Amino acid sequence: MLILGIEASGNSASVALVQAQTTLASVTRQDRHGHAGWITEMVDGLLMDASRNFSEISHIAVGCGPGSFTGIRVGLAAAHGYAIGLDIPVFGVSSLASLADGVAANQRVLALIDTRRGHIFAQVFLGGKAISEVYDAPEDDLVNHLSAHISPDDNQGSAGLFVHGFAASAIANILAEHGHVITQFQDADPDAIMAATMVASRIQAGETAADFPATPHYHSSPLLGPSKAKSGQG
C-alpha cells in the first residue's frame, strides 16, 4: 500500500508518499496562490526523492477542504487525474478531519482552517468523529460562536481541548481565558501527510474509497474578483 497524498486547500500546497502510515517523502510550497501551475511538478519531484514510480502508487488521498476555493479544485483535479491515469482509488478527506485525526479517543479537538477572508472554519471532533457542524466564524468573534457548542464542563469531562490548526495558539489562549481547559495547541496547516496517514489507517480498518467520496467541501461561496462578480461567473 503506497499512498500519494495531495493537499492544497490551506495556505500552502503539499504532496506526500505514505506507506503503512510511514512517510517516505513529502514536498511543500508555502505560496498562497498558483498551485495549479506546479502541483504536478511537485509530484514528479516527490517520486524522484523517494525513488519510486507512478506504477507503485496504490491509492490517492486528497484534501477536500474546507479552505481555499481554488486550492480545493486544484487538489481534486490533480487527484482525479492521477486516479484515472493509474486506475487506482482516490479517497477524499475533510481537511478539518485530517487535523483532528490520530488524537486520543477521549480528547476533544478543535480544528481550525483559514478562510482567507477574515473568517475561520472550525469544527470539533472526539475520537476522530465530528461532533459539531462546520462553523464559518469571524476571527474576532470565534469564541462566542464556539461557546454555544463547547462548554468548559464538557472540556473537563473529555480530558480537555486540543486546539489544532490556523492561529491555534492565539485562539487557545482566548478560550483558556473563557474557562476552557486547553491540554495542547499547535499552529498548523492541513497537509498531504495528514491526509495520506488518515487514509492509511482507514484502509487498514477495512474502509474503502466509497466511504470517502472525493468531492469538494466548500461551506461558503467563492470570493470572486470584480470582473467575475459583475458577470456572475463562478
Image (tube, helix red, strand yellow):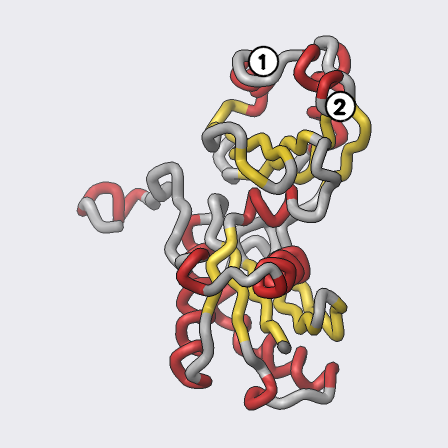
Dot 2 falls on a residue whose secondary structure is loop
Q: Is residue 166 visible?
A: yes
Q: Position of residue 158 (x, y in %)?
A: 72, 24
Can residue 30 be seen by looking at this rendering? no
Closer-to-camera residue (29/187): 187
The residue under the point 80% across, 32% down is 184
Q: Residue furthest right?
A: 183
Q: Is residue 162 above or below residue 17?
A: above
Task: Identify the residue shown where x is 57% and y is 87%.
Answer: 54
Q: Position of residue 180 (x, y in %)?
A: 73, 15
Q: Amino acid at mark 2?
A: Gly
Residue appearing at x 74%, y 73% in the figure: 25
Q: Which residue is mark 2?
A: 160
Q: Quadrant of residue 171?
A: top right
Identify the residue shown where x is 59% and y is 72%: 4
Residue under label 1:
147
